[in-house]
Amino acid sequence: MTIKPVRKAIFPVAGLGTRFLPATKAMPKEMLTVVDKPLIQYAVEEALEAGIEQIIFVTGRGKGALEDHFDISFELETTMRARGKSLSVIENIRQQPGSPVYVRQQEPLGLGHAVWCARDIVGDEPFAVLLPDELMVGTPNFMAQMVQAYDNVGGNVIGALEVAPEETDKYGIISPGARDGALTEVTALVEKPAKGSAPSNLMIPGRYILQPEVMKILDAKEKGAGGEIQLTDAMAKLIGQQPFHGFTFNGERFDCGDKTGFVTANLALAMARADIGPAVRSFAEARLV
Ligand code: G1P
């Protein structure tokens, strides 16, 4: 079996962000910042560092700020240049002309549907999916570690992280088979199992490397949990037909789709910074006594 390299990554960014209102009324939730960088930029940088070449955004109405963020800001750059300011903090965000690629989802029909909207751009190649709500911190980063594992085993490799048993109803959950280091065989998958019925506490944390055949399964537009077209259900149908592994990331995960995760990410990343870390830490220490 030849293992085709992963060159493309899909970023589903059409979600409405209702959990973060009012912040996300007029601003895409992917533009929420952790310290001084929007969530989407963390995810795009993770993919680029992992060797991904083509960035694909599955977007929707009201998400124009995302396109502007990865473009040239003419006024800003001209003014900064005239004032002799360094442009390094914004220059490295820009992509090559023609990239990223943007496709529209039109209607919020589920994560499986969002991924399927990129089928023509993906074509007959393996691809990655990164959910920008999930901020991952580690060296090498999560996707880079996953690509390395995929280059050995091929097939489908998805993130697999343990969560508290009472949280399993919020996520896609893996039925684990044999474990070999960071890789665990996946024997079944279930999206948001009812409380008490989860096959394990191994959840899917929004990082995927998938084979293009999943798009053909998504063609059927079958609805699953919550009446949505679920990526988890389509992936489950590949088990037994293609290699399928969970990958346990050696690093830290912040679920920034959740307020506690978002605030915690800000605190952790601020404390880790050389410039503002000491001040933030001493404030936190003083507050905690
Ligand atoms: C989605 C996926 C779920 C995954 C989760 C990770 O759910 O459907 O399988 O575990 O992302 O954040 P959502 O958070 O969109 O409900």
Image (spheres, helix red, strand yellow):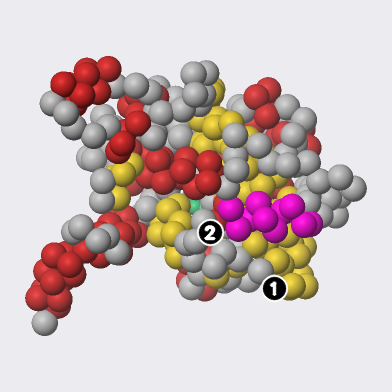
* Quadrant in the rendering for residue 274: bottom left
Is 148 part of what is drawn in magenta?
Answer: yes
Question: Which residue position holds label 2?
Answer: 140
Residue at 60% across, 39% down: 52
Q: Secondary structure at mark 2?
A: loop
- Left or right: 236 as drawn, with respect to 34: right
Q: Identify which residue is drawn at 59% across, 34% down.
A: 53
Q: Is residue 37 left or right of residue 281?
A: right
Is 190 rendered above or below residue 202?
above
- Which residue is nearer to you in this view: 226 or 112? 112
Q: Residue furthest front?
A: 84
- Identify the amino acid type marked 1: Gly
Quadrant location of residue 204? Answer: bottom right
Examine the structure image and report whether residue 200 is included in the region drawn in magenta: no
Whole-percent x, y for residue 120 in the image: 68, 23
Q: Please identify the quarter of the rendering in which residue 278 is found.
A: bottom left
Amino acid at dot 2:
Pro
Q: Which residue is mark 1?
A: 181
